[in-house]
Image: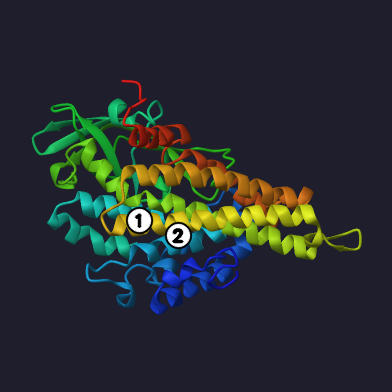
Amino acid sequence: MVPLPSTADFYQFSDMLTAAERDKLRQLEDFLAEHVSPHLAEWWENAVSPVHLRPMLAKLHLDDDPALLDDTGQPRAVYRGFRNFVFARCDLSVGMLYDGQVGMFRTVATQGGSAQQRARLDGPIRSFDLTGCFALTEPDHGSDIARGLATSAVREGDTWRITGRKRWIGNAAHSETIVVIARDEADGQAKAFLVPRTAPGMRLTTIENKLSIRLVENSDIELDGVEVPESDRLQNINSFADIAAILAELRPAVTWFAAGMQAGAYEAALRYTKAREQFGRPIAGFQLIQEKLARMLGNATATLGMAAQLSTLRASGRGTEEHSALAKMWTSDRLRETVALAREVCGGEGIIVDNDVARFFGDAEAVYTYEGTREINALIVGRAVTGHSAFVK
């Protein structure tokens, strides 16, 4: 892998990083080059989740190295963004394996938990001694999950009984604990529960034959009267608004992933065009190839810039739902275009996983859909700029 700054960081946004942050990201790049990149084609072909990387990643201390922590005891938002950029520039699935734990699971568990729950959970989550994931989406409810949440929770004394189904839950098969969102039948509000994967009444089925994120094992989950003690209900989540506020902190991640994937696809395509010869010279010297490379670089640069500013806005308290929605909508569009161009300049070789661009091409379809569809995000932005809601009530 090319060391920071990436050749796709044409405007040098990585200058925003401190020396300590850059050093840590170089350690991550070295790790990915040694332990991940040589095996990606095999893992992709066999749809294998490289969960064996978890303890190795924990030893890198990507998020708990004292040299990275600010006055709040957390790494800066722009560093966390570039961390996701570096992961996705290598492989999105490996990035999701890490960020699903330290980003999503940890954020939901610690921000949604009481002080006592945070003290109990934070350390083990950071060290990967406690692994987990987040279960919100359902078979019949994705975009309308806030109103359509069908998984139910009934309280009986100090015990909750949860019944329902979840779908597309990443890393569930390899997580000890699953944060399940269910609707409290008493007040109709969403609540969050820490549910052991092996709890009686819990059944997981792996979703097979995926085109995208093949290294992530997504699961269908059925819960049939699963019992959870009140002590394992996240105490600070008492409505869907509470969940939405937490998820808003996580939204910039998808934009950083889109930036990293475009960087990876562009760099793979650039390497190929410099090495591939036709008509007696490298195809990188052909006008039409250079035009496509320039478009890819422009898309990747603009996406990285939007990701960096989005994180800056969120960190300063000025970021809004509309900022995240516009970033998700626009950058996933650019991602689709960039990976298609990368596949195009590689010709027939572009559909072979060994050449990297095919993985980025396939994974872009997952990014295009998750964290809100293009249409939903467009309506969020449209409502903000016009003052009129076009959502069906």
Q: Which mark is residue 103?
A: 1
Give the quarter of the figure containing the C terminus.
top left
Residue 257: x %, y % from top left: 48, 54
Q: Which mark is residue 34?
A: none
- Residue type at mark 1: give it: Gly
Residue 164: x %, y % from top left: 31, 29
Mark 1: which secondary structure? helix
Whether pointer 1 and pointer 2 mark residues with C-beta atoms closer than 8 Å, the reply is: yes
| Nearer to me, 383 or 211 | 383
Of the image marks 1 and 2, the number of the one nearer the N terminus:
2
| Nearer to me, 91 or 289 | 289
User: Residue 275 vs residue 141: left or right?
Assistant: right
- Residue type at mark 2: give it: Asn
User: Residue 75 vs residue 186: left or right?
Assistant: right
Residue 19 visible somewhere in the drawing: yes
Q: State whether residue 22 is above or below residue 221.
A: below
Residue 98 visible somewhere in the drawing: no
Residue 313: x %, y % from top left: 33, 56
Q: Residue at x 45, y 54 (%)?
A: 306
Q: State whether residue 128 is above or below residue 214.
A: below
Q: Residue at x 42, y 59 (%)?
A: 308
Residue 1: x %, y % from top left: 60, 69
Q: Which residue is mark 2?
A: 84
Mark 2: which secondary structure? helix
Among all residues in the image, which is located at the extreme right? 279
Among all residues in the image, which is located at the extreme top? 393
Inter-mark Cα distance, 1 to 2: 10 Å
Q: Residue at x 14, y 42 (%)?
A: 230
User: How many residues crowd around disc 2 within 10 Å: few (fewer than 14), some, or many (20 or more)?
Assistant: many
